Image: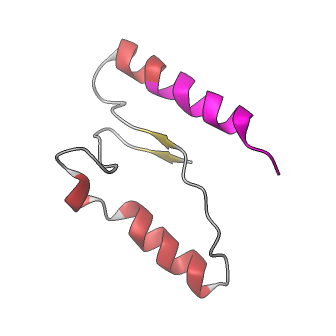
């Protein structure tokens, strides 16, 4: 799970400044973990309503995962 104050996923203006997921993907890949699923809660610094919306969406994505 990835949490951030801004919005850096594909399709957002700041996507080119995403250093968190590429760095972690590289580290995990070096360790042999390559099949990663990123769940993002973004925009957490944009107020209580935005935070709750993002966290609820992330929780729903987690619940939908099958292992």
Q: Which residues are magenta?
A: 54-67
Residue 47 appears at what percent x and percent y? 31, 18
Residue at horizontal 41 percent and vertical 23 percent from the top? 51
Residue at horizontal 45 percent and vertical 27 percent from the top? 54
Q: Is residue 61 shown in magenta? A: yes
Relative to 52, is 7 on the left or the right?
A: left
Residue 18 appears at what percent x and percent y? 29, 59
Outermost residue toward the top in this view:
49
Is 28 drawn above or below residue 30 in the view shown?
Answer: above
Residue 7 sits in which quadrant?
Answer: top left
Residue at horizontal 32 percent and vertical 65 percent from the top? 19
**Colour treatment of the image:** secondary structure
Q: Is residue 36 shown in magenta? A: no
Outermost residue toward the left in this view:
13
Relative to 55, is 5 on the left or the right?
A: left
Overall secondary structure of the magenta section: helix
Residue 48 appears at what percent x and percent y? 37, 15
Is 49 drawn above or below residue 7 in the view shown?
Answer: above
Outermost residue toward the right in this view:
67
Relative to 37, is 26 on the left or the right?
A: left
Is 16 drawn above or below residue 34 in the view shown?
Answer: above
Residue 58 sits in which quadrant?
Answer: top right
Residue at horizontal 38 percent and vertical 43 percent from the top? 4
Relative to 32, is 27 on the left or the right?
A: left
Residue 53 appears at what percent x and percent y? 45, 19
Total labels: the figure holds 0
């Amino acid at each position: 799970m990835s949490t951030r104050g801004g919005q850096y996923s594909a399709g957002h203006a700041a996507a080119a400044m995403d250093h968190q997921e590429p760095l972690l993907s590289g580290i995990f890949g070096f360790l042999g973990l390559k099949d990663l699923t990123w769940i993002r809660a973004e925009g957490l610094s944009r107020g209580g309503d935005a935070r709750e919306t993002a966290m609820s969406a992330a929780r729903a994505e987690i619940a939908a995962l099958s292992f």
